[in-house]
Image (cartoon, grey):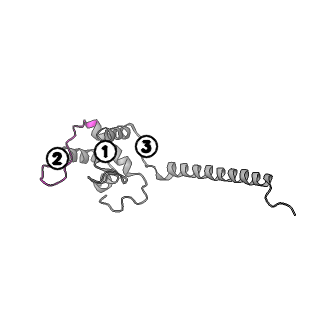
Amino acid sequence: MAEILTKSRARNIFYGGSIFFVVIFVGMTVHSHRYVVNKSTAGMELSEEVILGKHVWERHSCINCHSLHGEGAYFAPELGNVMTRWDVMDSPEDAYETLDGWMKSQPTGIEGRRQMPFFELTEEETRGLAEFLRWADQTDTQGWPPNDAG
């Protein structure tokens, strides 16, 4: 009676299994890359204004208070859909004016409320931040946040 699992058969199973799972891994990597590029990224291109806005977001540590698509702190509102909530998604100028007015009105000075500090942003930086938030609002977040209020 022949042995069921010889050294050569074990080696072939090992190599065959390894190749099979490497092919599966590469296939899943390609699928993930295509999904991210074609489905879940924002509809807007990454313009210079969007990049500037991202730098403003990082330089002023906005994520220390706000969340963006669920990432960050929960002290202040979610900003991943703020342009939709403000109904200025389709107008860069309205988005800028609304954000600029909001930023200039802070802090309100109302006792007992969480207050956003005043940031001395240039018009260019505020426009960039508005464009970054419009760009982030177009990302397919698969239903996040779970409600319109963020």
Which residue is drawn at the image coordinates 51% and 48% (left, top)? 37
Q: Residue 107: tell me if it is visible.
A: yes
Q: Which amino acid does label 2 sit on?
A: Pro
Is residue 48 positioned above or below 76 on the image? above
- The x and y percentages for residue 8 are 80, 52
Tag 2 residue: 107
Residue 130: which disc? 1
Membership of 119 in magenta stretch = yes
Name the main secondary structure of what is drawn in magenta.
loop
Q: What residue type is labelled 3?
A: Glu
Membership of 141 in magenta stretch = no
User: Dividing the picture into quarters, in which one does residue 70 lie?
Assistant: bottom left
- The x and y percentages for residue 54 are 35, 41
Is residue 42 positioned above or below 53 on the image? below
Between the C-alphas of marks 2 and 1, the distance is 19 Å
Between the C-alphas of marks 2 and 3, the distance is 33 Å
Which residue is drawn at the image coordinates 35% and 48% (left, top)? 134
Tag 3 residue: 45
**Considering only order in the chain, which callout, 3 or 2, is on the residue closer to the N terminus?**
3
- The x and y percentages for residue 27 are 62, 51
Left or right: where does residue 50 sit relative to residue 4?
Answer: left
Q: Which amino acid does label 1 sit on?
A: Ala
Q: Is mark 3 on a helix, strand or loop?
A: loop
Quarter placement of the C terminus: bottom left
Report the residue that reaches farthest toward the bottom. 1
**Considering only order in the chain, which callout, 3 or 1, is on the residue closer to the N terminus?**
3
Q: Nearer the viewer, residue 111 or 78?
A: 111
The magenta stretch is 108-124
Left or right: where does residue 32 sit relative to residue 65?
Answer: right
